[in-house]
Structure formats: C-alpha cells, structure tokens
Amino acid sequence: MAIKKRHSRPTAKRRRAPVTAQGPLGPSVTKASSVATSDLTSSVFQHADPLLALKLLTPKDAETTSTTSSLLAVKGSQSASRQKSSLATAQLIRRYHTLNKELSKCLTKLNNNAGNGTKSELSIARRSTPDQTAKELSRIAEIRKEMDDLGGLDMYQKASTLGQSKQRGGDSSKWLIPVLESCRPNMNKKTDPPLRLLDVGALSPHNYKRYSSWITTTPIDLNPQDPLITKMDFLEMPIPPKQDQLFDIVCLSLVVNFVGDPAQRGEILRRSAKFLVPGTGILFLVLPLPCIQNSRYMDHELLMEMMASLGYTTLVNHHFAKKLVYYAFQLDRGPGSSLKKVQPFSKKLRHDKPNRNK
C-alpha cells in the first residue's frame, strides 16, 4: 500500500510592526513610510523647494515639529508677500494711468479756453466761467500732487519694470519673435543684415538681447530706467531722412494707452508709419485688453479701420491674452504715398453698456 506523504503547512511569517524612526521630523514618520518616499523626496530635494519634500514626508493629521511649522509658515508668508506686492504694483499702475488721463482732459480744457483747439472745442470753452477755470486749475494741482505722492513717473516706470519681470510673466517681446520669424522664413540669422528695431517706451534694453545676432535694438523712453536706454520723446524724435535709416520693426508696447490725450494717441500711431520700411515694416502694438473689449468708444473692428487708414492694411497676427492684446501690423503703403491726408475718426459711442470703460 502506497503511503501518502504528508505535506507540512507553511507557517505564516509574522509581520513586524514598523519601527518608529526618530529623526528631524519626529516619531510620526516610520521606516516603512520613509523608504516608500525616499526616491520621491530625493528628486524633490534636488530639483525643487526642500519645503515641498517636508510636506510630503509629513503624514496627514500628524503634529509637525516647530522647525517644520516655522519653515512652512515662512514659505506661506513669502507667497502672501509676493501676492500683496503684485497687487500693490498693479494698483499703482492703474491709479497713475487714471490720474494721467484726467490730467490730460483738464489741460485740454484749459488749452481750449486759451483759444487753441477745434471749433467745437472752442465753442464749449467759451461757455466756461472764471469759476470753472479756477476749478480746473485747482483739480490739476490736486492731480499732480497725488501723482507726486505716488512717486511720479519714475515710480510708475519702476512698477512697470517689476511687472514685466520673469516672476510676473516676462516682457511682451516673447510674443513678437515667432511672428517676425514667420514673416521672414528665408532669413539667414547669421549672414543676413540684422533687422532694425525701435523700442518705444522701453523698460529694459535687454528684451531682445538673446536675438542680437539678427535684431539690432534702439530703445527709447521718456524716463529711462537704464543708462542704455536713450531719453527721448517719440513725438519729438527726428524722422529718419534716408531709406536705409528706417526701421524694420517699431514696438509700441503699452505706450499708446499711457497717453491721456486721444489726439496724441492718434499722432503716435500716425507717426510710427514714418519710421518703418514701406512694404515690409512691422508695427508691434500691445494694449490692455479692456481698451479693446471693454471700451464704449473702441473695439477691434474700429482699430482695424484706423490702422488701415494709416497704411497698415495687413494684420499679420494678433492675440487676445488674459490681460493684454497683441497686434502685428505690416505697413503696406507705397514709398510715394503720403500720410498727410488721413481719414478723421471722431469719438463716437459704439457700445452703450453700464459696465464699459469710459
């Protein structure tokens, strides 16, 4: 008779309870959890903020040590500080814009009272009483004082420079480069003559530094924040007398909207065409998005009409971002055409809604 072999049952091994690791994070972190997260945290420590690793190593519902809590609290306070700084910068820029616009309106009224201006403006000005004129002068003094209290144009420029820093999203020139490359697909960046770029209202002379092999930049501004930027008013800048002195690109990034007087805004756009090479010149125009999408008097269609009347009949590209709108226009007028006779555009209500900007 065959004898069946008895197979002994394997005894189950007892699992040891994880041994508590006594370390800088306290007894709440076990060896098991420490081993499980070692690969993750090592990469976090190498490539990111160590405080993120501290968060990953700290189990939920565990009491953190005073050191960890302090570090996380500092991190949180730094983040809150950056948010407050960004908010304060934006508020300063907006307030300065508002004051500058109101100042331009007050000065225009006084200029009309003095006998300068259009017939309709002068007829309105003649109805102004001495008391109204005195009130305008008083308001002008108040506006200028508040602008000085904000730090004046110098502080506005510093705030704008901070606003275009890498931590706040960078400058708007990064949108222009791909557009220029698409306009000149056959350009040899190493051997062809570099493109000449006029950067009006430049906050930094280094916006196009990394493209210096094929772009030569001339930065100008009313109140330069860098010695490499030329102090110059674009409205008074001499027009290049020769064809080879014209520019291939003119940049008006957040320039037109800064000017409070509508007539001067139009003059800036009209004048830009005199600095560009006809047929190939590119105007880079950047505006706050509300100027186009939330205005009572301006929208995308009207801007297209205005630019076409100035010779910018080709819209190369445009982009509506979260806060800004980017335009790249090509100057298509012939060399012999004149910009002296430009279709006038009067201020007319286009969008009558209560939430629209005035």
Image (tube, grey):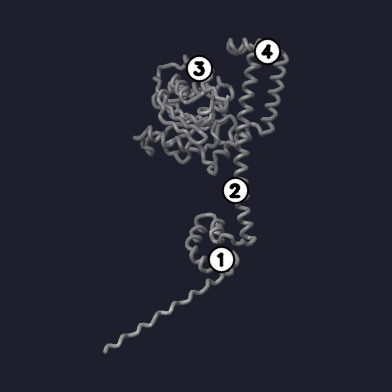
Quadrant that contains the C terminus? top right
SS for callout 4: loop
- Neighbor class of circle 3 (other Cα within 10 Å; few <14, some 14-19, many 20+) is few
Q: Earlier in the sequence, mark 1 or mark 2?
A: 1
Residue where numbered disc 1 is placed? 29
Q: Earlier in the sequence, mark 4 or mark 1?
A: 1
Going 50% across and 36% down the picture, which residue do you hit?
322
Calculate the distance from the C-alpha at mark 1 to the C-alpha at mark 2: 27 Å
Residue type at mark 1 is Val
Which numbered disc covers residue 128? 4
Residue type at mark 4 is Ser
Calculate the distance from the C-alpha at mark 3 to the C-alpha at mark 4: 26 Å
Location of residue 67 (image quadrant)? bottom right
Please say if the residues under marks 1 and 2 sit with CB atoms less than 8 Å apart: no
Direction from residue 339 to residue 81 in the image, left or right: right
Please say if the residues under marks 4 and 1 sit with CB atoms less than 8 Å apart: no
Q: Earlier in the sequence, mark 3 or mark 2?
A: 2
Residue where numbered disc 3 is placed? 345
SS for callout 1: loop
Q: Is residue 197 above or below residue 6?
A: above
SS for callout 3: loop
